Image: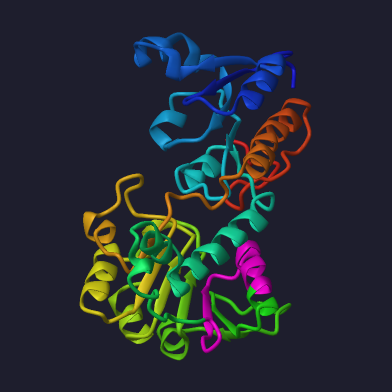
Amino acid sequence: MTDERPDILMLRPMMPMVIEQLEKAFTLHKLWEAKDREAFLAPVAPKVRAVAANTVIDASLMSRLPKLEIVASFGVGYDDVDAKWAGENSIVVTNTPNVLNEEVADTALGLLLCTVRQLPQSDRYLRAGKWLEKTFPLGQSLRDRTVGMVGLGRIGMAIARRLQAMNVPVVYHARHAKPDTAFRHYPNLIDMARDVDVLIGIVPGGKDTAKLIDAKVLEALGPNGILINVGRGSSVDEQALIKALKEKKILSAGLDVFVDEPRVPKELIDMDHVVLFPHVGSSSVFTRAAMAQLVVDNLLAWKAGKPPLTPVPETPWPPKRR
């Protein structure tokens, strides 16, 4: 890089450790502090060469930044960033994979256990004084269940390893079979749903996975089936799920992600037999700090003229020239 302190745009506040490090190495422009967004952007946009992102970064915004070279996105999922447009316009996009795998896998197991064993419900039962009246009803178990993973990337494998340790059989559906795993691969999701008792969704967002788990899949899962989703809310047909739960076409659901976060359908909130988390998959101090540091490290590598550490597939390094 020829600039000693390249101009970088941050749309929303990020962790203090990110802001502090970026202010030392870059000229940081904090859009969220501006009373008038357009007046703020007018003189800044022609200079911006990098964006630190934890919100939507679409083509209309990137096209206003003629010198933009890199978008460093906070999170393993980057469907809020138009990576296809970025790649076509010589802009590299980075995300924060791997550093959150184990935390999300832990959360998935916790959500699964909460849902299958009705642990939040039993907590509420005790607090309401009902244990004084009679014992909490017997519930379901993992002992007689097979889990079907919808997606078997790095996080999916981390979940599957935990299930193996618990002696729970695992199979999976993905677009392509994984040659390095002995888990059975189902090319057809409906066939897998028919053969398992639990589906765990851990696929990214985007048009390829939109409403992947639909009414037909839920019908195949059956009245004893449980759906767990820790991937993206958009991968589930939410209205079909609500209908399936109401009509007892499946037994229960445990959800950490939703279509229109943080707005969750009232129908789901009103159901006592489902477990809902407010998208806390990677929400620990340890893991969020690691994710934040990877955002900084990607930007510092780019500033030093080195390859960014974690470019997404749509924007390989070095970028194509415009």
Q: Which residues are magenta?
A: 142-162
Q: Is residue 235 visible?
A: no
Looking at the picture, does residue 202 appear above or below residue 73?
below
Q: Quadrant of residue 157?
A: bottom right
Q: Is residue 60 left or right of residue 178?
A: left
Camera-side residue of 124 and 233: 124
Looking at the picture, does residue 32 appear above or below residue 249?
above
Residue 181, horizontal then vertical, whole percent:
70, 79
Q: Is residue 258 left or right of residue 24?
A: left
The residue sitting at the front extreme is 132
Residue 5, horizontal then vertical, whole percent:
69, 14
Residue 280, horizontal then vertical, whole percent:
50, 49
Residue placed at 61% from the left, 53% from the top?
313
Q: Quadrant of residue 209?
A: bottom left
Camera-side residue of 71 and 281: 281
Residue 150 lies within the magenta run? yes
Q: Quadrant of residue 55?
A: top left
Residue placed at 32% from the left, 70% from the top?
133
Residue 233, horizontal then vertical, whole percent:
39, 57
Q: Is residue 52 visible?
A: yes
Camera-side residue of 103 and 96: 103
